Image (tube, helix red, strand yellow):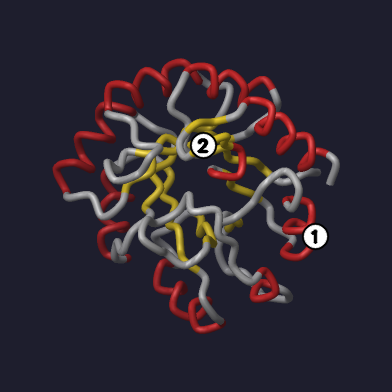
Amino acid sequence: MPPFVKICGLSTPEAVDAAIEHGATHIGLVHYEPSPRHVDLKTAADLRKQAGRHVQVALLLVNAPQQLTADALAAVRPDIIQFHGNESPEWLGVVKRLTPATVWKAVGLKDAGTLERMQQYRGVADRILFDAPAAALPGGTGTRFDWSLLKNHRHTMAWGVAGGLNPANVAEAIAATGAPLVDVSSGVESAPGVKDVDKIAAFLKAVAAC
């Protein structure tokens, strides 16, 4: 069975339709103003409604304050809340208790020590998303991490791989890591924040062939 596929950073109805049509299992909506993929809460809510039950919808936040987190969850009602900043395990635990949404935590995988430190999220994060270490912006940079770090790693939580994936290398990433979920954003764009429906189709075709 191919891995689950999340197409992240969608901002238009056309991109949502393309992800669904070509077989994505998850889509991601980014509510983080510095990102070129940022959507306001009304747009996120509209796209979430459009997606319906065809895919799981993740809302991505980065170091969002408490009130913004509450407002975003109430407005969008995502299936998944994905934290992509320096959020603490304690904060994830609070959110997990107060919302029916599944809680994901993105972790920049720098070295083997990261795999030890991420254990602090065990029991509060429903899935760990391994990404490239944060640069100027967290995520969506087109940078990949060293996939060999995950070779033979014994995972204690559900997980997935992000960071630098594209139609040309996703099969290699899956073979190298055994990822049960892959997450792509900039790798299916024609410009920062502009999704390319042909690249979305190619990415999903490449995963399906695995």
- Residue 206 image position (x, y, % from top left): 79, 41
Mark 2 lies on a secondary structure that is strand
Q: With respect to residue 76, does 6 lie above or below?
A: below
Disc number lying in front (2 or 1):
2
Marks counted in the figure total 2
Taking the spot 57% from the left edge, 36% from the top edge, the residue there is 189
Q: Residue furthest left?
A: 67
Taking the spot 52% from the left edge, 57% from the top edge, the residue there is 129
Dot label at residue 191: 2
Kind of residue sitting beneath label 1? Ala
When asked about the image quadrant of residue 195, the answer is top right
Q: Residue furthest bottom?
A: 113
Q: With respect to residue 150, does 5 lie above or below?
A: above
What residue is pinned by disc 1? Answer: 175
Kind of residue sitting beneath label 2? Ala
Asked whether the beta carbons under mark 2 and mark 1 sit within 8 Å of each other, the answer is: no
Q: Earlier in the sequence, mark 2 or mark 1?
A: 1
Q: Nearer the viewer, residue 93 or 9?
A: 9
Taking the spot 74% from the left edge, 53% from the top edge, the residue there is 169
Relative placement, left or right, of 88 versus 1 is: left
- Residue 74 image position (x, y, % from top left): 25, 30
Mark 1 lies on a secondary structure that is helix
- Residue 188 image position (x, y, % from top left): 61, 38
